[in-house]
Every structure is written in C-alpha cells, then in structure tokens.
Image (cartoon, rainbow, N blue to C red):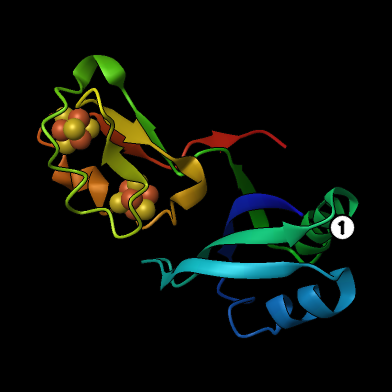
Amino acid sequence: MDKQKVRLLFSKQLVDKPIISSLVRECDVTFNIFKAYVTSQEGGVLLMELGGEEAKLGNAIAFLRGAGVEVQLLNEAISIVQDNCTHCGACTGQCPTDALTFGADFKLAFAPDKCIACELCVPACPYQAISPAGQVTG
Ligand code: SF4
Ligand code: SF4
C-alpha cells in the first residue's frame, strides 16, 4: 500500500461538508488524521496520511481538489537543516513517535515514516534547525 501525507485546507464554506467520508466511500482509500484545527480565517486545516494503491491515491487527491479543497502534498513533515543541528537531543525528547532519535553515532536520526507531523519538535530546537512540513508540487 502506498501512502501520501497531505495538508488539506478547507474554506469556511467547506468545513461542515462530509468531504472526508465521501472521499473514503468513493475513492477506496484509508486515512489517518495527524492534526486538525481551525485557522484564524475560520477555515479548516487537516494534516493526514492517505493510504491505498497509487492510482486510488491519485483519484483521491483529484476528488478533494474537485470538491474545492486545497491539497498540499507533503514529502517529509519536517525539514532539518543539518548545518544548524548540534545534535543536542532537545527535539528527541519531544517527539511522541520516536521519529527523532539518536543513532549509535550519537547523531540525530529522522525516520519520516514514523513522523505524524505534530510539529512538537519545531519549537523544541534551540537552534531553529527544524522547519514545518516541506511541501512538494503536485
Ligand atoms: S513533527 Fe512530531 S512526530 Fe514528526 S519528528 Fe517532529 S515531534 Fe516527531
Ligand atoms: S534540537 Fe535542534 S540542534 Fe538539537 S538535535 Fe534536534 S535538530 Fe539538532
């Protein structure tokens, strides 16, 4: 099964529509919501991971865009600027899923497949080495 992390932006007019349930019913994909919140503009934001066959994921993204949802495809949920990292470990203590750990070499290691895009590590870094979700085109 393929997976794709996405950030979905819902306008105020869309937040009460059953778009996700329609997505699952019509596109035969699974989903795992990492984060959901309402923005200051009163729109909604969902950070989630879609799962399914590659073609079905493509259909799902097309379905969402057709419904008026802005879809941002995410590669890795965070970016780490290696030059700024001192391997101090402050971020690993905040990560709830062990996506950030120390390897045997006592250097920071990042496992993107474990990351749930919670962004708790971003403010934890005293050197601003971690940035939120890296968006890819598509
Ligand atoms: S975003 Fe959350 S899950 Fe991902 S590495 Fe940072 S703390 Fe861990
Ligand atoms: S908190 Fe920042 S400097 Fe420390 S290990 Fe994590 S990314 Fe590196």
On the image, numbered disc 1 is attached to which residue?
56
Farthest residue, direction top: 83
**Dot 1 surroundings within 10 Å: few (below 14), some, or many (20 or more)?**
some
Quadrant of the rendered image containing residue 109? top left
Q: Nearer the viewer, residue 18 or 129?
A: 129
| Residue drawn at (83%, 63%) of the image | 63
Placement of 29 over or under 116, stated as above or below: below
Name the secondary structure under disc 1. Answer: helix
Q: Is label 1's Cβ within 8 Å of ligand 1?
A: no
* Quadrant into which the N terminus falls: bottom right
| Residue drawn at (66%, 50%) of the image | 4
Image position of 69 (left or right of 55): left
Image position of 123 (left or right of 66): left
Counting every numbered tag in the picture gives: 1
Placement of 27 over or under 134, stated as above or below: below
Farthest residue, direction front: 104
Residue 100 x %, y %: 31, 42
* Quadrant into which the C terminus falls: top right
Residue 127 x %, y %: 13, 29
Res. 44 visible in picture: no
Res. 100 visible in picture: yes
Quadrant of the rendered image containing residue 56? bottom right
Q: Nearer the viewer, residue 111 or 55?
A: 111
| Residue drawn at (28%, 31%) of the image | 103
Q: Nearer the viewer, residue 15 or 117?
A: 117
Placement of 28 over or under 125, stated as above or below: below
Image position of 20 (left or right of 29): left
| Residue drawn at (71%, 60%) of the image | 51
Residue 89 x %, y %: 14, 37
The amino acid sitting under disc 1 is Lys
Quadrant of the rendered image containing residue 107? top left
